[in-house]
Amino acid sequence: LCRGGLAERLCRLQNRERAAVSFWRHQCIADAKIPSDKSGVLIVKILEMFEECTIQVAMCQQLEQSPASLSSEDAVISAGEPMLKVLFARETAAHLKSRPQDVIHIYPPWQKLLLKNADVPVIMNTYFSQKVLLSEHSETREKTHGLTKMFIRKNIPSLAQAFRLDDVDDELHQESSDNQVACAPEVHNNCDSKQYPIAQSAVNDSLLEMVESQGAVGWREARVQVVIQRVYCLPAREGYRSHVQGNKPLCATPIINSDPPNVRLCLLVQDAYGMFSEVQLQFLSCADDIEEYCRRWEGKFCCLAGMKILQRTTRGRALGLFSLIDSLWPPVVPVKVPGQSQDSEMMTTNLPPPSFCYILTVQSGEIHVEVDEEEQISNLYQPPAVHGLKEILQMDGCNERRSFWAQVLYLRVQTKHSVPINQREICLFVTDSTLQNVVHITPKVVAVSVTASYVLSTEVTEALSVASRLVFFKDALWGNGRIICVERTVLLLQKPLLCSAAGADLSELTGPVRLDELDSTTQANSICAVRGTVVGVNESTAFSWPTCDRCGNGKLELCPQDRGLLYCNQCSAVVISPVLKMQLEVFLSCPSRSESMVKVKVWHEVSFGLFVLINMLLSPQSYEVQSVLGKEVGLLNCYVHSVTSHPNCVGLEEIVLL
C-alpha cells in the first residue's frame, strides 16, 4: 500500500475496528452478563430475516425497556415506533446466530440511515450487538434450535439489477424458495428435503455471479457449469503436500527430497460469459497421468462445487497465466453479455480481454468437480492451434503461446554445479519438416528451453533418454526469438485428437536430419555440423580409458583370478574385447569460419584385442600426435559451448544425436 495513502489509512481503520469488536465480545463473555451501560442501546425484536450480497438483513421492530423476567415473546412492542431494517455483516451474523423472535441489543455507535421514498429506516454499524436470552424458556428454545438447520431466504441480485441495465430476464427478479440456503453448519436432521429445497440442484453458468453471491469462504450449496479449456500440472510450492485418502480430510506430509517433484493437477475453465478461472485440484506424485487427463477432460463440461477462492490475480501479477488466457481470446462462439437476456444478441467481437482471474481450490479435501466425459465437446472449447516451426520463427509478438509438433534430436541439461540437479534447466534441440525440407533456410534446428519450474513427466524423460521422439509441445511460450516451456505448458508423446493445424505442414521427417553448418552466424548454446582439417592437438588434456563392449562401463578392473584380464562389475564377466575410448581436444581449420580458431573436444572409440590394449595401457605413450595432424574431419555433430571475439575462438564438443 502507498505509505500514508487512503488505502493504508482504511486498512488501519479496519484493523482497529476488528480489534475493538473482539475486545468488546471478550469482555462480555468474561463478565458473563449484559453490559450495564444502557445509554444509547437500541433494543429490537427480529420479525423476518434474509440475506443479500453477503449482508444479513433483519426486519425488526423496536422494543421499549422490558423487564429481564419477560421472555422475548412477551416483550412489549412500541406501536408508535416504525419498523427498522437492521443490517448485520457476515461476521456479526455468524456470531449472533439470530432467528426470528430473537431480541438483540445493539450498542453504540450504531447509525440510522433515512432513505428517500422509503418508510423503513436502516440501522447500520451494528458490530457491537448481543443476543439476549431473557428466560429459561428462551434458553431451552436456543438449545433446541441449535440442533436444527436454520434456513433463510437468500436474495441473489444479478449485476444487471445492481446497475439497472435494461432488458433483464424476468427470471432474475423471481424470489422463490429455491434460493434458500443453510446459514448454519449442516447437522443430521429428519426434515423433509422437499420442505427446504436448497440451491444444490440449481446450476449457475457465471463464475463472477457465484463469486459475488457466495463470497470468498466457499461455495457450499451452489454449483457452476464451466468448460475445461486446458489441463496441466503446476509444481507444488507449498512446504507441505496433501494426499486424498477416500473421503478422509487431507493430511499434510512434509516434502523432503521429493523426486519426482510433487505436482498439482489444475484446470483452466471458462464460463458462458467468457470469464476464466484456474482450478487447483489434488496433488499428484508426478505428472505422468497428465496426458490421460488431457484426453478425457479437455473440451468437456464440468460442474464446480465446494470451491473457495485462493486468490484474485491480475494480468500484471500472473503474466504466464494471462499469456495462456490471451491465446484463447476472443471466444470462438458468441458468449453471453452481463445484463442481457439469453435471447439477446450475444457478442464475439470487440470484447476486451479479461483483466483478472480467480484462482480456485477445493475445500478441505472434498473434491467436487463433476466432468461429464460422455458429453460432446463444447462449442466454446478452443483446441491448440498447431504451427510449423518455420511459421513460429517468423511471427512477431512477445510472450505468446504456441503449439507445435517436432522431432527432439538432442537433450542437454544445464551443467552449472552450483545449481541442484532438480533445479537445472533442460535444453531440447528440435526440428520439423518445415525446417528440414527447405534447402536454403536457417536455422535447421531450434533450441527449446525447459525451465526448472516446468514439470516434465517421467514418461517423456524416459522416452527421450532412449531415442529421438516426436513430441507435441502444447502452449509453449514464444518471444524474443526463444521458445520456452514454462508453467502451464504440456509435453505429450501423442498428438491430441482435437487440434487445429492452421495450415501448417505436419508431415513427418523421411530422410536424414541436417544440422546448420558452423559459420559466422553460429551462436553459443546451439548445435551445428563441423568440417575442417586438424591443425593441432592439446596433449595436456588428452586421455583414454577402456570400456566394456557389452554395457559400456568405463570402470573396468583387473580380474582377481587372472591379472592379465579385465573384469566388468556390472556384467559380472571378463571383458574379452574391450573398447578404448579416447578424448582429444583438437584445433581445426574450418573454411566456413576461417577467421576463428575452432577448438573441438572429440570422442573416439577403437576396438582392440585384449593383449594389444594391455600393452597400450602399460606403455608410456598411447598414440602418436603426428598421426592425427592434417586429417580431414567432418561432418561432426557438435554442441557450441562458447563463441568469443577476443580471442576469436569457438569452443565445441562432439555430441551424439538421439
Image: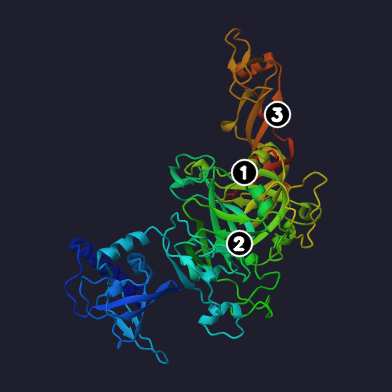
Report how far apart the C-alphas of labels 2 and 3 lie in the structure.
66 Å
Q: What's under tag 2, amino acid-wise?
A: Val
Numbered mark located on residue 597 in the image = none
**In this view, 360 is above or below 533:** below
| Residue 483 in view, yes or no | no
Numbered mark located on residue 288 in the image = 1
Which callout, 1 or 3, points at the residue further toward the start of the chain?
1
Image x and y of residue 520, in percent: 68, 54
Q: Residues within 10 Å of mark 1 (few under 14, many from 20)?
A: some
Report how far apart the C-alphas of labels 2 and 1 lie in the structure.
22 Å
Q: What's under tag 3, amino acid-wise?
A: Ser
Q: Residues within 10 Å of mark 2 (few under 14, many from 20)?
A: many
- In the displayed structure, does residue 301 sit left or right of residue 444? left
Q: Quadrant of the N terminus?
A: bottom left
Q: Which element is circle 1 on?
A: loop
Query: Circles 2 and 3: CB distance less than 8 Å?
Result: no
**In this view, 150 is above or below 79:** above
Nearer to us of marks 1 and 3 is 1
Image quarter of residue 564: top right
- In the displayed structure, does residue 202 sit left or right of residue 379? left
**In this view, 405 is above or below 167:** above
**Residue at which label 2 appears:** 269
Q: How is the image coloured?
A: rainbow
| Residue 225 in view, yes or no | yes
Nearer to us of marks 2 and 3 is 2
Which callout, 2 or 1, points at the residue further toward the start of the chain?
2
Image quarter of residue 587: top right
**Residue at which label 3 appears:** 627
- In the displayed structure, does residue 399 sit left or right of residue 102? right
